[in-house]
Image: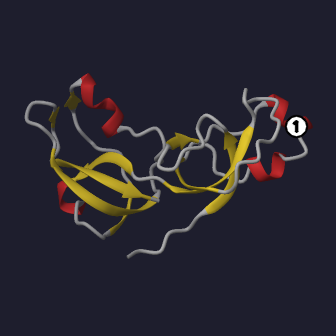
Amino acid sequence: MTETNTTITLIGSRLAKEGEDFIFMGESRECGKCKLKRTCMNLDPGRKYRVSKLRGDTVHNCFVHEGGVLTVEVESAPILAAIESRKAVEGSKISYELPKCTEFDDSVYDILYPECLKEGDKCTVVKVLGPMEDGLVSGCSLKKVELKL
């Protein structure tokens, strides 16, 4: 069993379900006037998180989320990505690099350029899902993986 790092935060009540993934988009203009701002804004903008546990059922008022916010524990969520085949080893620690493919099918854009990863991010290869399907990329050898920051 691996140890997970969790953070206590507030999220919209509609997202507050164990196992739910979301990308934290950062502060809204309306957040400036909220007394709970410090608890909500303790995540990294642009990063993907997974709700690991609900912490009670008290709904707090929110200027942004209709239906208020709930207290939850979150952890970094696995990110589906394509990396060089030689780096795709379960359990290995890598520095994320954008694929250097010369051509690719539009259907694989999201896996080649995951929204929540940046060049140089330190990641762990959680799971190797297999090679990219034939004909979808050219000019590089890639495997689909789950990464965790």
Secondary element at image label 1: helix
Q: Quadrant of the N terminus?
A: bottom left
Residue at figure coordinates x 18%, y 61% from the top left: 86
According to the image, what is the colour scheme of the structure?
Answer: secondary structure
Pick the front one: 101 or 15: 15
Q: Which of these two is toward me, 9 or 109?
A: 9
What x and y, as percent, mark residue 132?
16, 42
Q: Is residue 99 left or right of residue 113?
A: left
Comparing 78 with 123, the one in front is: 78
Q: Position of residue 20 (x, y in %)?
A: 49, 44
In this rendering, position of residue 23 left or right of residue 111 = right
Q: Position of residue 95 (x, y in %)?
A: 40, 61
Residue 28 sits in which quadrant? top right
Up-down relation of residue 88 to residue 83 (above or below): below
Residue at the image point whose x is 63% and y is 37% from the top: 25
Quadrant of the rendered structure where residue 138 is?
top left
**Above or below — where is 99 with respect to 64?**
below
Which residue is situated farthest in the left direction here? 134
Count of numbered labels shown in the rendering = 1
Q: Which amino acid type is shown beneath numbered disc 1?
A: Gly
Give the camera-side residue of 41 and 13.
Answer: 13
The residue labelled by disc 1 is: 32
